[in-house]
Amino acid sequence: MGQLQVFSPAAREKETSLAQGFFWSTIPGLKKIVTWIDEGSAPFFKWVFNQYPDLRLYDVRIEPAPPWNEVTGLLLTGGSDISEKYLRQPVSDASLIKNPDLARDEWEFGIIPKTMNQKLPILAICRGHQVLNVALEGTLHLDIPGHGEPRQKSNNIQELRFADEVALQSPVVNRSHHQAVDKLGNVRKVEAWFKA
């Protein structure tokens, strides 16, 4: 049983983006975070984490991770769809799976149990929520109708409500995603929901 940390700010808001780094900076002893970042998102994450020089982000897509005994956290970022091989549900139409990255999936689905067994913090953003949910035996909505429409991209910012004990809160998230959590996996609690 794990805990699903729901914190997924709209990337274009610098103040909220800095809060991502702030989230990590508030955890004592957190120094070395491993992740897999898509090439197009790398400059954004570099900018965010440069604000926090005591945190070192290792992008295993382009560099080796530190020895496991030195890793202090896992960041699951956005990106392409999860490969069908890792989904815990039937896929009626393979064309619903867009641009899967099998190498990334192998790394993320391999590292999540290890991270959870050591009780290391995990921050999941966008696709990262989906990966974490599937790793915890949940399922996904494989296609959100209207995802590609311009109105959904620009008008799909949603307010959140939080469990009482959640200290760090992002007021809104962009829910303009091609896929989303369907059946919740084995988590102890959910910390945030859409208000609608």
Image (spheres, rainbow, N blue to C red):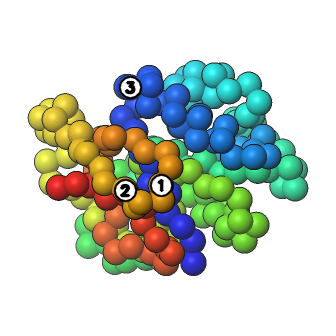
Say left or right for 103 vs 137. Answer: right
Q: Is residue 71 above or below residue 88?
A: above
Residue pictured at 70% horizontal, 51% vertical? 73
Q: Position of residue 67 (x, y in %)?
A: 87, 50
Residue at disc 3, secondary structure: loop
| Disc 1 to disc 2, C-alpha distance | 7 Å
Dot 2 or dot 3: first in sequence order is 3
Q: Is residue 108 above or below residue 183?
A: above
| Disc 3 to disc 1, C-alpha distance | 21 Å
- The answer to whether residue 114 is visible is no
Picture quarter with the C terminus: bottom left
Q: Nearer the viewer, residue 95 or 67?
A: 67
Task: From the image, state whether disc 3 or disc 1 is nearer to you.
Answer: 1
Residue under pointer 3: 13
- The image quadrant of residue 157 is top left
Kind of residue sitting beneath label 3: Glu
Residue under pointer 1: 166
Q: Are marks 1 and 2 in contact (CB under 8 Å)?
A: yes
Q: Position of residue 6 (x, y in %)?
A: 44, 54
Q: Which mark is residue 162?
A: 2
Q: Which mark is residue 18?
A: none
Task: From the image, state whether disc 2 or disc 3 is nearer to you.
Answer: 2
Residue pictured at 71% horizontal, 65% vertical? 119
Q: Position of residue 95 (x, y in %)?
A: 28, 58
Q: Is residue 118 above or below residue 98?
A: below
Residue pictured at 25% horizontal, 45% vertical? 159
